[in-house]
Amino acid sequence: MNTLQIEQFRKFKNEITRFMMAYKFALDAFETKIEILKEEFQFLHDYNPIEHTKSRLKSPESILNKLHKKGHEISLPSIREHIKDIAGIRITCSFISDIYRISEMLQNQSDLTILEVKDYIQHPKPNGYRSLHLLAAIPVFMSDRQENVCVEVQIRTIAMDFWASLEHKIYYKYDKAVPPRLLQELKEASDSASALDRKMERLHNEIAEVKEAQPLELAETMKRISINNQHYQIPEALLRLIGDDPENG
């Protein structure tokens, strides 16, 4: 390999690296957003609607395979235009209502551009798959430019996530040729998981109603704030700004 070829290869490698780094930075920015939402919700409501998150970046080989299947030319602009799930993040929630709450909070953020919403909870796939999908563009500030990078966001409950994981393993084991009997059982399992989600949400709401019915405990809780495991008592002078002590209604 001569000097010119080495230089061309180095330039090409740098272009691919920067291309992939933009998607990595987009995931980093998205995870920061989610972490802020988690902490804010925990502080304000003493409750965290997000159980856990998981992000992934498609490999260059996987990207090219998908581009080839779609029949598009192989180039970085072509990849950017036609492959929208290079960067993906999955948010797992406890309850169905949390899914829509998180989705609404993300859609209200001014620096996010929501390109597409697919609701597979209200309209499950025929095989039983349930999840809420968002395709969002997030700005990434590089050293010499700003790029709007697409991130695919999947939001689902623990039960939905467990079902999707099982379905993926079965399809992988049978190389997508899953026997009809197993397909039917998977669909039934999806219906059972959906029923469990609805029952757990109903129990959660009933528990919340019981907690709100304890005014003295609520009044004491309202006089304290907790940030980073540090607990602070709200001074009486600040409490007087709202006119009345919480205990006095």
Image: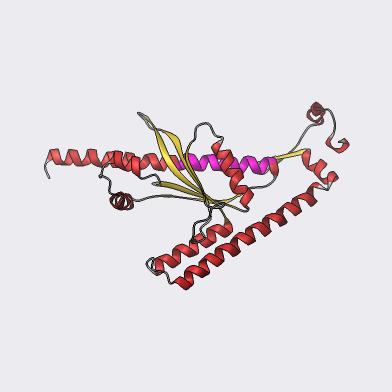
Quadrant assignment, res 18? top left
Identify the residue at image location x=40%, y=47%.
85
Q: Is residue 228 visible?
A: no
| Magenta stretch, residue numbers | 27-44
Image coordinates of residue 172 in percent, x first then y, are 40, 65
As drawn, the residue found furthest toward the right would be 248
Identify the residue at image location x=18%, y=39%.
8
Locate the N terminus by quadrant. top left
* Residue 122 included in the magenta stretch of the image: no
Locate the C terminus by quadrant. top right
Image coordinates of residue 73 in percent, x first then y, are 25, 44
Instruction: Name the side, left or right, on which 29 lies relative to 41.
Output: left
Instruction: Name the side, left or right, on which 191 lies relative to 231.
Output: left
Please name whichever residue, 107 or 158, is drawn nearer the observer in this view of the structure: 107
Quadrant assignment, res 216? top right
Please name whichever residue, 58 or 84, is drawn nearer the observer in this view of the structure: 84
Q: Is residue 211 visible?
A: yes
* Residue 39 included in the magenta stretch of the image: yes
